[in-house]
């Protein structure tokens, strides 16, 4: 049997006290604290799914740890805010075009994916070879399906885009990447044009032209952004919204969009009625002021009515299908009016033109700083370390609810 050394059993020797050292505050990479595990590991949580289905049924809150040893080109980030978009819910359901791979990179029992396309992170630590960002910087994802519904993550620095945080809130930055960018890009790329008069059905936007465009889903995030950009750029908009439960609620919505800058707001029932043709002629001076662009996020009869409202050579751009009904277009519109039916997918455009995307984000955030662009209404969902799984899953499930009072957004607190 091993016996302790006599030296260890003896009374401890007396040491001379070391000279006192003046303490100085240690610089902290961020103002908000985060959970630290043993040996410097960062404790993190993420919403994940291992099979497709309804968010309330397949999402799980996964706890894991992140090693302090970062690859040289990577950064450790903490999420400040992350939005809940319909596309995120569709991705979880498996009905969206892009399907992120299921992996076990964050230690899940089964191959899983973390949802979330849009959000803003704060850099906690940057790898040794990273010079594009530093601790304390705010960054947003460059590509889709990076997974923003989590408290912390490690990403390659090249997958993140630094934004100037001056004068902005996390919510404002988190909201910029999808809806405002979609409206900005569709108006800039397709523009409401003179169509056949210029020989181009899809041409760049002419600032201050006073030309018309028409859109359904005008109360959506994209719709509200398009209204504001149109006002800033000298365009005019006709905006179609769903009828509310009461005339008072409908009138309140019309006033809200008019205050944003909408030139005309009509309900879906008015838009699909026989009287719409006369109202349209009244708005466009008997068709002398052409409507060169339609923005469709609904589909079905609403999309067909948009196409019928376009002038010769106009373009109907579809970027969503909230009604889950196909876009049906009469062949006569294609043959006799040269109406173009095209689709728009922001993720593809961002991938093809990352430089253009960076300029676009900067431009929009500058408008936000100047008070010229207002965020869409949101519903804040607080995410702290102790927030329960069912609260987060219910918020995700609500991403497709009708007549929502605002877009859901996770706002991260003590994580």
Image (cartoon, grey):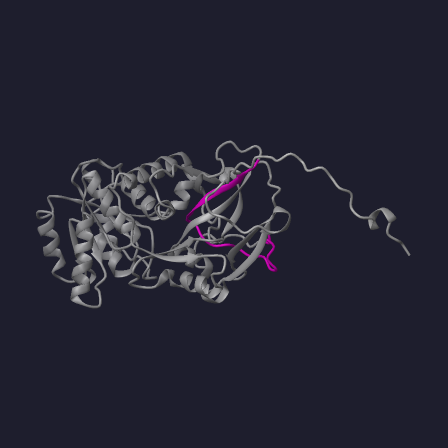
| Relative to 154, residue 302 above or below | below
Residue drawn 20% across the image and 53% down it? 257
Can residue 327 be seen from the camera position used here?
A: yes
| Image location (x, y in percent) of residue 203 | 26, 37
Task: Judge whether residue 293 is colored magenta.
Answer: no
Task: Judge whether residue 126 is colored magenta.
Answer: yes
Q: Is residue 207 left or right of residue 161?
A: left
Please name whichever residue, 98 or 5, is drawn nearer the observer in this view of the structure: 5
Q: Is residue 339 left or right of residue 155?
A: left
Q: Quadrant of residue 391?
A: bottom left
Residue bounds of the magenta highlight? 104-127
Prevalent SS, magenta region: loop
Please name whichever residue, 114 or 412, is drawn nearer the observer in this view of the structure: 412
| Relative to 354, residue 154 above or below | below
| Image location (x, y in percent) of residue 412 | 44, 53
Residue drawn 50% across the image and 54% down it? 114
Q: Quadrant of residue 357?
A: top left
Q: Is residue 369 left or right of residue 54?
A: left
| Relative to 31, residue 134 above or below | above
Can residue 195 be seen from the camera position used here?
A: no
Residue drawn 43% across the image and 59% down it? 95
Question: What is the residue that sits farthest to the right in this orientation?
Answer: 1
Identify the image quadrant of the N terminus: bottom right
| Image location (x, y in percent) of residue 409 | 38, 55
């Amino acid at each position: 049997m091993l016996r302790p050394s006599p030296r260890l059993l003896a009374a401890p020797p007396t040491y001379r006290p070391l000279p006192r050292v003046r303490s100085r505050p240690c610089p902290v990479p961020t103002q908000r604290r985060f959970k630290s595990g043993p040996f410097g590991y960062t404790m993190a949580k993420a919403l994940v799914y291992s099979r497709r289905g309804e968010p309330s049924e397949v999402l799980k809150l996964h706890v894991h740890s992140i090693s302090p040893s970062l690859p040289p080109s990577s950064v450790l980030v903490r999420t400040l805010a992350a939005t809940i978009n319909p596309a995120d819910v569709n991705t979880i359901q498996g009905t969206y075009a892009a399907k992120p791979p299921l992996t076990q990179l964050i230690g899940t029992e089964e191959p899983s994916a973390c949802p979330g396309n849009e959000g803003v992170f704060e850099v906690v630590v940057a790898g040794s070879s990273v010079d594009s960002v530093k601790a304390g910087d705010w960054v947003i994802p460059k590509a889709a399906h990076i997974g923003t519904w989590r408290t912390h993550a490690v990403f390659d620095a090249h997958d993140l885009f630094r934004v100037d945080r001056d004068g902005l809130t996390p919510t404002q930055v988190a909201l910029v990447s999808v809806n405002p960018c979609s409206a900005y890009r569709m108006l800039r790329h397709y523009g409401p044009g003179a169509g056949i008069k210029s020989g181009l059905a899809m041409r760049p936007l002419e600032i201050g032209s006073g030309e018309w465009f028409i859109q359904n889903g005008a109360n959506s995030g994209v719709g509200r952004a398009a209204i504001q950009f149109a006002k800033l750029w000298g365009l005019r908009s006709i905006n179609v919204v769903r009828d509310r439960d009461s005339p008072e609620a409908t009138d309140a919505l019309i006033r809200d969009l008019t205050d944003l800058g909408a030139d005309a707001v009509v309900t879906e029932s008015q838009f699909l009625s026989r009287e719409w043709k006369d109202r349209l002629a009244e708005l466009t001076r008997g068709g002398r002021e052409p409507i060169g662009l339609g923005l469709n996020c609904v589909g079905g009869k609403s999309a067909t009515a948009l196409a019928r409202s376009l002038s010769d050579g106009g373009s109907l751009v579809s970027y969503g299908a909230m009604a889950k009904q196909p876009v049906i277009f009469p062949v006569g519109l294609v043959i006799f009016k040269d109406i173009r039916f095209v689709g728009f997918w922001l993720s593809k455009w961002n991938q093809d033109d990352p430089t253009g995307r960076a300029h676009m984000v900067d431009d929009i955030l500058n408008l936000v700083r100047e008070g010229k662009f207002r965020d869409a209404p949101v519903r804040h969902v607080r995410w702290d370390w102790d927030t329960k799984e069912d609260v987060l899953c219910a918020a995700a499930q609500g991403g497709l609810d009708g007549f929502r009072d605002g877009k859901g957004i996770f706002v991260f607190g003590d994580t």
